[in-house]
Image (cartoon, rainbow, N blue to C red):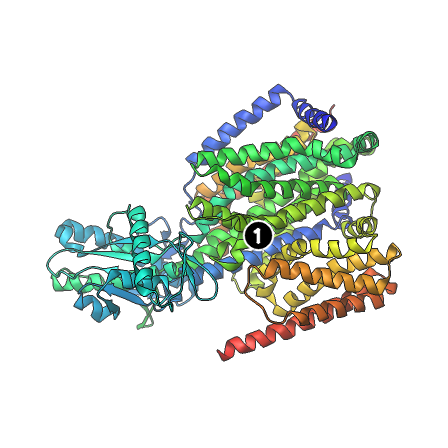
Amino acid sequence: MIIMLSIALLELRLRRKWGKRFALALLLLSAVSALIVINSMTIRIDYGIYTSNVKVPSPLFVTSRVNPDIMVRGKLVFVRGDMKSLSAFDEFRRCVRSLYRRWIYEKYGERAFPVMVRVVRVGRVLGGGGKVRTVKGVRHSPASGKKAASEKRVKRRVEFKVKRKEVRGFETPDRLKPPSLLKKLIYAFSFIIPMYFVIQVYSSSLMEDKIKRRMELLFAAEDEWRVVLGKSAPYLLISMLISGAVIAFMGKSLDGILFLLPIALFLVALGTFTAFLARSYKEMTFLTVIASIFVTVYLFIPAIFTSGISEMSPVAVMLRLFSGKGVSVKDYVVSTSQFYVMSFVLLYMSFKSTEVMYGHSNPLDKILRIAEEAVDRYWKVIMFAILSIPFVLLAELFFLSFIVKISIILALLAIGLIEEYAKGVIIYSAIKNGLNGISSAILTAIGFFIGEKAIILPLVHLRILLLIPLAVHVATSLIFLALARFGFWKALIPSSVVHAIYDGVIVWIFLGSALRI
Amino acid sequence: MDFLRICVKDLKGIRREKTVLMVVALLMFVASFSSLIVTGLELLYSPSGFSNARIALVGNAPVFSSIAHPIHYSDIVRALRDMVDGKVDAVLVFNENLSSTNYITIYVPENELRDIKAILYLKRVIMEYQDVLRRLKGIPTLEIRAYIDGTTVRVPDGYSLHFMLIYVMLIPLLSITTAVVCSAYLIDSICEEFESGTLDVLLSATEPGEVLAGKVLSSVILCIALTAIWVVMLMFNGITVHGIATLIPVTLAIFSPLLLISLVTSVITKNREKAQLTFSILAIPAIVLMFSHSHSPLSTLVRVSAGSPVYTLDFEIVFFLLSLIPIATAVLSGMFGLE
């Protein structure tokens, strides 16, 4: 413990060597940057994007006689029919409507606005199976016979919610706006982004120690985990302090820190792993950028949804907490456990990477070498298969977010490749360590299946097709095993293709039934 | 011509480290994922995305009912319970009054897709209702239609959202990502020479200016290559990009201020950590300034890619920023390699 603290203090002292002048310059720059950012928030890059033959009182329009986007002749507006021209008409109409509203108000006063509206949003949380869980967590079924009691409960809750929410006054109907899901995400970004910067500095510091061979000296003197935890502790603390300050500044519950802790821990573990794996600063930067995007997708994409899959994102659950809705211990465990698991695995793999950290092979081969160090018992085979699931889900979500748009076949192949790579690494390592191939393949498939269902089943109410995926996992693992003697990559391709074909059949069945509905 | 050899060495270095593949993956992600967001947002926020919603009405409103055809309820509690149960998407409470203002309270489920659906539908219906009431009061209403060759064409409200998301959000985002990636690459490329001690070896064989010019040139080539990739990706996604030949110098002009910051910070600090941190702090206001000025290279990029008119001033600014790259490289060459 004392040694860990000493390493943490040494890390802080090393940063102090940057010098007071440099720190002051950074501080000044930060202040100036903040001022510039605040003063320059109006976006003007869309100015002059549309053309019109007459002067339109909007900065988006410029006058042009040559093939304008909209041609105004008297009371008629002519368009070309392409997307830009129709968009220009839409903006022109908005502009004219605004002028019209001003005109009728000046001429007819309040009489010109015969309708005023206000929106009251009634809080609720959707549960599974057609039931509704109210904000207070009490369940009732629409089909239950206790209608009177249920009605009273609903009335009480509605009255409570309405009293709480009725803060807005009435306004004209043109000001009606739906809630912005993007705003919710951007708001959540403000808690996470500072962490990325801190972790970037941390991984750079580790990389510097590695390149200057200081890491070897530290590892010779002390356990790897003590060195890494000692070096990372200040950064973890700084991340949490910054995020805590942002939460406090925004006037939100400091309980939110509990959701940010696993994310910060995971980013520290990721920074450690990429620094140990990378061969140069450049490679580390790109590994960190790519890993950060993977994490961002994993954190934010599920948060867009309102129920089900959103429960797997700590950001979504944190936002729910901030909006005053109940968050149970189960919600916390479901949303954060994968991050704790991934942090543990990444740190464990980092400690095992001391033998390969100075090697010149590519990062994927290095992962294979590290796994060989780790998977040397049968119980470890099944354990690592289970623990690999959050990583697999993270990679799958990333690829699905964009490959599906390009080609569903590519997406299926990517999913097959990701899952078979994870299983293949474990099987390959077990064989290299002298474990029985068939037992290892079957144990890997079982572990993978258990991990997959443990994460997915609490989120998605899918209780069918449980045994078929297990059979497929066993089959593809055995295919990999049979071909492993030709090399890792040559064995990976056929097993991935078989996996993709299975996924394709499942998608085809589901799509078919959905289309019939 | 040593700078060309250094440039080639640095570019080969990228290939060896497989980093190009990662950058390609990054841009593919941004290009494709953002286009997914654009499609999703269009579906969600375009009024034409939702043609209908189930509306409950508590109260007496014959004119409104003739327009919106709501389900009538006598009890607000029952109506709200049906909304919570998903039988209706929104509940409206009001009694119609043709002689004075009608105050309508709209209840919608919080934070649900149904909220978006209901509000978008209601906005259209209530605006129509407002026009009917205005006509009854003798107040002129606004009717504005688009024509193609004398035929009326229906343009839904909010149609411009898709166009704006592509040309004002997605394309600037891709170009900024490219510039930031290339700047990070330049910082790494310069600082690595200082920190690994290989700069002395290089300087024993060639001039400092040649080394720096080689590194800058490799980052410029990387920027051009990445721009070409995202332009192709966008076209692959069915997005029309105008003025492709002009896009390259404009994207380089966007990269130019960030390149200058990364050059100055890495040559002065000679330390990757310090350079990256200072770059991050300075790059943010630079990017914000580009977003907030109507003649910035980012604005020019928007207008060029959308096929809108570009002004002489825009090109002058682009040329000025482009000329800064060789000037800054020449000036900083004197400081490069100094202890």
The residue closer to the viewer here, A268 or B7, is: A268
Name the residue rendered at 25%, 47% in the picture: A169
Q: In this view, does A3 lie to the left or right of A235?
A: right
List the single residue furthest toward the top: A20
Where on the picture, by quarter, is residue B43?
A: bottom left
Q: How many labels does the image show?
A: 1
Where on the picture, by quarter, is residue A413?
A: bottom right
On screen, residue B313 above or below B155: above
According to the picture, the residue beneath numbered tag 1 turns out to be A334
Q: What element carries label 1?
A: helix
Residue A163 image point, x, y percent: 28, 48
Task: Look at the image and tell me in which quarter the N terminus of chain A lies.
Answer: top right
Mark 1 surroundings within 10 Å by alpha-carbon count, few (fewer than 14), some (14 through 19), many (20 or more): some
Residue A213 image point, x, y percent: 81, 32
Residue B129 image point, x, y percent: 22, 64
Q: Is residue A372 left or right of residue A315?
A: right
The residue closer to the viewer here, A141 or A353, is: A141
- Read off the chain for label 1: A
Residue A315 in view, yes or no: yes
The kind of residue tagged 1 is: Val
Name the residue rendered at 76%, 49% in the picture: A363
Residue A236 image point, x, y percent: 62, 35
The residue closer to the viewer here, A384 or A407, is: A384
Name the residue rendered at 76%, 41% in the picture: A276
Residue A96 in view, yes or no: no
The residue closer to the viewer here, A424 or A17, is: A424
